[in-house]
Amino acid sequence: MTLAQLIRLLQSSVCFGTVIMYGSIGEILTEKSGNLNLGVPGIMYLGGISGLAASFFYEFNNPAPSPVICLLVSFVAAFLAAALGGLLYSFLTITLRANQNVTGLTLTIFGGGVANFFGGSLNTMAGGVGQISVAATSAVYRATIPGLSGLGTVGALLFNYGFMVYLAIVVAIVMHWFLNRTRKGLNLRAVGENPATADAAGINVTRYKYLATCVGAGISGLGGLYYTMDYIKGTWANDGTIESLGWLAVALVIFATWRSVNAIWGSYLFGLLFWVYLVIPDLGRDSIELFKMLPYLVTIAVLIGISLRKKRENQPPASLGLPYFREER
Amino acid sequence: METVAAVQLKNITKRFGKVVANDRISMEIRRGEILSLLGENGSGKTTLMNMLAGIYFPDEGEIFVNGAPVTITSPKDAFTCGIGMIHQHFKLVDVFTAAENIVLGLEDEGRLDLKAAASRISDICQKYGFVIDPNKKVYDMSVSEKQTVEIVKVLYRGADILILDEPTAVLTPQETDRLFDVMRNMKADGKAMVIITHKLHEVMDVSDRVAVLRKGQYIGDVATCDTSPQKLTDMMVGHAVTLNINRPDPKDPIPRLEVRDLTVYDAMGVKRLDKVTFTAMGGEILGIAGIAGSGQKELLESIAGLQPISPGASIRYRPIGHTEEQTGTELVGKTPLQIKQAGVSLAFVPEDRLGMGLVGSLGMTGNMLLRSYRKGRGAFTDRKAPKQLAENVMEQLEVVTPSVSFPVRRLSGGNVQKVLVGREIAQEPSVLMTAYAVRGLDINTSYTIYNLLTEQKMKGVAVVYVGEDLDVLLELCDRILVLCGGQVSGVVDARTTTKEEVGLLMTRFKKEGEKA
């Protein structure tokens, strides 16, 4: 393996990891409130297609698009659409007390359907399959800091990415700080662990659950945005990749033992495991698919590991997946 | 002494459906005093105090705090009034530290400063004599430590009126003494304290004044120094009521179930039964009396094979047809299925009725099937026999249901219990154990159940009846075994004993090593 190959592998791992990191840290926030939202893939779909559609219409109607507006329009659209997905999930599971697993899975199917339908429509409007391209917006997302990215190996490894790669790390760290160092974070964790206790302590359980789920979904949706804008460079493909990445994001939540800072290195590790087949010589198509299973196998190993160690801090929030309603007696 | 009471209740009434849990109760809680709230199970003690804590809202009546009328609709309101209640079931987050649990939900300004909180917690602990490590996780704590966290949580929020709901139920005698010391310190600091309990010796030990409730009514209050356990028991149980339950004499009683040295520890390692020894005779109803949580559930479950039993115990069992000379079989070590097939039947009516015996979404037929699904031939279950049985039960016990396939969850409580008891009786058991079989039932249905049990007794079945109402136990049973703190505090003849005697046995908590 040459150095160039190694750099390319690490870069691919970071890009791949960033997609699932967003999905994963959003889901960590959601799960900390006790909501198990299995709609992550669908939410990432919603984020991806909304960001793409927003910038497409902006670029379509403006011959000279402004980079700032390109960025704003797509970013806000992606976040809001994904948060709306979270709102839908919250309404169904918190207010109507629908089953969380079923609702989440339905949301995944819904998000995929919506995204692929409009993705197809956008392609048609742009002139045919695979024709859509939001070059101006994608360029903003892929812009690197001039000067730094040229600094040899270090520059290639650390500074050769679009801003969303760095934003993901910042969000993960801020979220860790929020959950563990602030009053609101403490309250939120209490809601996910023991909502009856939180309720008795005067915490508005419903409000915390709604907010955490919607904001969490919004963050997850950014994963879809990063995927369309940077990862596939402002295009659309109805190939179901977002869905498989979304499930990896859910697996990463477990791998990270519900800590957003663990999701940073965990996501890059998943990326590395996913792309490692690139540097292994003489692989056939079938063995490539086997290698792509690695992240899932590692997740299963971690799951077994943490259940064996029985450390309480590594367990999921105690009331994850359970609906809460005050007992009336 | 100041003249204005810390809390004054005036004509407080609380109803749950048709049941009146508190009936026009007026009482006072004073500063610098420990008040015991005494009463049997279901006398309304906890309900009354829950209205002060903001869990329930009174249907009628007024509450005054420091002389001013207040409306308490949530735990938050209660804190604003300075009222804090320590519930029997702790409300703590297991993966949080003591300090995190204590500051949870507080809306102080600024950032979360656990160090400052920890030092305030240490101050409170020092002042009253608690021992607590603010950084210890709750899951690492003993029951007593958790309780301390709950009390500190209340004090941290500035409460000066403290209500403790049966705080000693989960404590060892040593821990209880330590708790009482802390309570005396808080009293000396001018706090108003209420302790809900039904252990008389604790009442005598710690409190200054005793208020007694019976069946939702306020009986009165006395200064502890002017009373005795005997007088308090009289106030608590009241006069015997005649129920006229049909009670034929036992029919050729032979020992059907001989339990020796039965000791059971629960999952937390707390001793629930301590060397329980007794004999249940065929052809009689053995009543089991005791304060809630004295080991009744564990006793029945360990006989049914559902509880791990400590070594050294023996449960000898002779089914109907065996004579006294035959040695019978040993039940310890058998699986619940083997015990059931041997003819020991358990009809346990838990608090939520459906929890342990029936599947709510199934109809009567389905629930009958739960006992017989192994009997079908091949891979298919036999649905005909259970359906027949369901129809019989429905007819004989007058279960009101649209059809035998109607989900039992949607039946009324009495009908649910009839289904459960009816099914167990239909197994033609040699030992029939029931717990709280008439809980929540109206008078007529209760009598139906009593008659069913008596019928079984006349067939030679050993009936074990765990009950709450002493009047019923006195009139239905032949002998009554009284449990107190997991020990047998006495076995009395139901025909000759008095309510006072049983009441005293129920509350006579023996300390380790003390003679019965």
Image (cartoon, coloured by chain):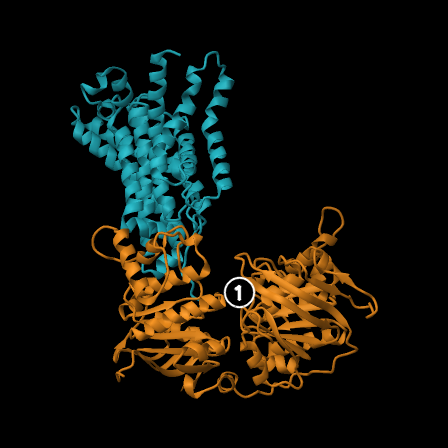
Chain colours: A cyan, B orange
Q: Is residue A313 above or below residue B43?
A: above
The amino acid sitting under disc 1 is Asp
Task: Tell whether B107 sits left or right of B41.
Answer: left
Mark 1 nearby-residue class (10 Å; few <14, some 14–19, many ≥20): few
Work out whether residue B221 can be spotted.
Answer: no
Residue visible at 71% across and 62% down in the picture: B314
Q: In this view, does B143 lie to the left or right of A24?
A: right
Which quadrant would the N terminus of chain B be assigned to in this image?
bottom left
- Percent x, y of residue B473: 62, 79
Asked where in the image residue B424 lies, by quadrant, the reply is bottom right
**Quadrant of the rendered image containing residue B364:** bottom right
Q: Can residue B51 be seen in this view?
A: yes
Residue at image mark 1? B352
Quadrant of the image for the C terminus of chain B? bottom right
Percent coordinates x, y for residue B264 in the rendering: 60, 61
Residue at image location 38% in from the left, 31% down from the top: A266
Of residue A37 and residue B54, the one placed in the foreground of this image is: B54
Q: Which of the 4 quarters of the picture holds residue B57?
A: bottom left
Q: In this view, does B309 lie above or below B39?
A: above
Image point (51%, 18%), residue name: A286
Q: Is residue A8 left or right of residue B498?
A: left
Between residue B223 and residue B410, name the one nearer to us: B223
Question: Which one is in front, A49 or B4?
Answer: B4
**In the image, residue B171 lies at what x, y percent?**
48, 65
Secondary structure at badge 1 equals loop
Q: Which chain carries label 1?
A: B
Q: Position of residue B119 (x, y in %)?
A: 27, 56
